[in-house]
Amino acid sequence: AERYSEGWEPSLELVIDGALPMEPVMHALKTLVDREIPTKTRVKVEALEGVQTRFEQDHSDLMLVKDYRPAPNLKAIPLPLITVVLVASREHPLAHCHQIGLDQLFDHVELTIQDTSDDQSGKMDSLQFGGDRVFYLHNFMGKKTALLMGLGFGWMPSFMIHQELDSGELVELDFKGGARVSFTPQLVYDTDRPLGKAGQMIADLIVAEFKTFEHNGTG
């Protein structure tokens, strides 16, 4: 009770897109723990539009998103670029092809992430190619396992597959449309629900930790 009287809010909730690195967030949360901040903190991981859906439904304090639907009440803080790479196992037929066209991709299974929003009316990730042979995975660790098994091809955040690219277990595909895409993730909060003392601290820490993550060459 004494700590809460110092202005720390009782609870704090973050919703994070599974395509973003968790390491900077965990470092930020560890700082809260080390400083014995009494705020109870929850972290939820969603995918694609499911991030904003969860943020809005649960009245969460912060969301870390790849993309979101802007609104007048939403304030966004840009974070360092994240790059995703189109890859397949070195055993996959596409790994040995040059100047791959869209028709060649459609001959193979595409691995992608299932949108966790409630609305499943045929929407798909903006990077999805849209062929008939698509396997939906629940998270990127499962997708990485499927890629390494040679089940199909797909986009992966570069920070998750540095070792596999270096070892040659995964191969960046020579796709005509480009095998690398970068986006600017955003840290978003609702100005109608201003951040409390712990919320502002964790937001500042996340921004700082993402910059460190980028400078270490892992972003």
Image (cartoon, rainbow, N blue to C red):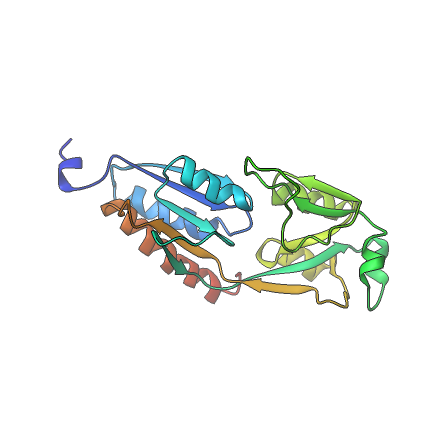
Quarter occupied by residue 211: bottom left
Q: Position of residue 14 (x, y in %)?
A: 40, 42
- Quarter of the image where the N terminus is located: top left
Q: Residue visible at 48% across and 58% down?
A: 185
Q: Quadrant of residue 167?
A: bottom right
Q: Position of residue 53 (x, y in %)?
A: 47, 40
Question: Can residue 3 be seen at all in this image of the molecule?
Answer: no
In x, y percent, where is residue 63? Answer: 42, 47
Residue shown at the point (57%, 57%) measured from the top left? 159
Query: Left or right: 40 with respect to 110?
Result: left
Viewed as shown, does residue 47 lie left or right of 62? right
Compared across the picture, whether 159 is left or right of 146 comes to left
The residue lying toward the viewer, choosing from 178 and 28, is: 178
Residue 59 visible: yes
Q: Nearer the viewer, residue 78 or 163?
A: 78
Judged left or right of residue 105, residue 118 is left
The mark total stands at 0
Q: Residue furthest top?
A: 1
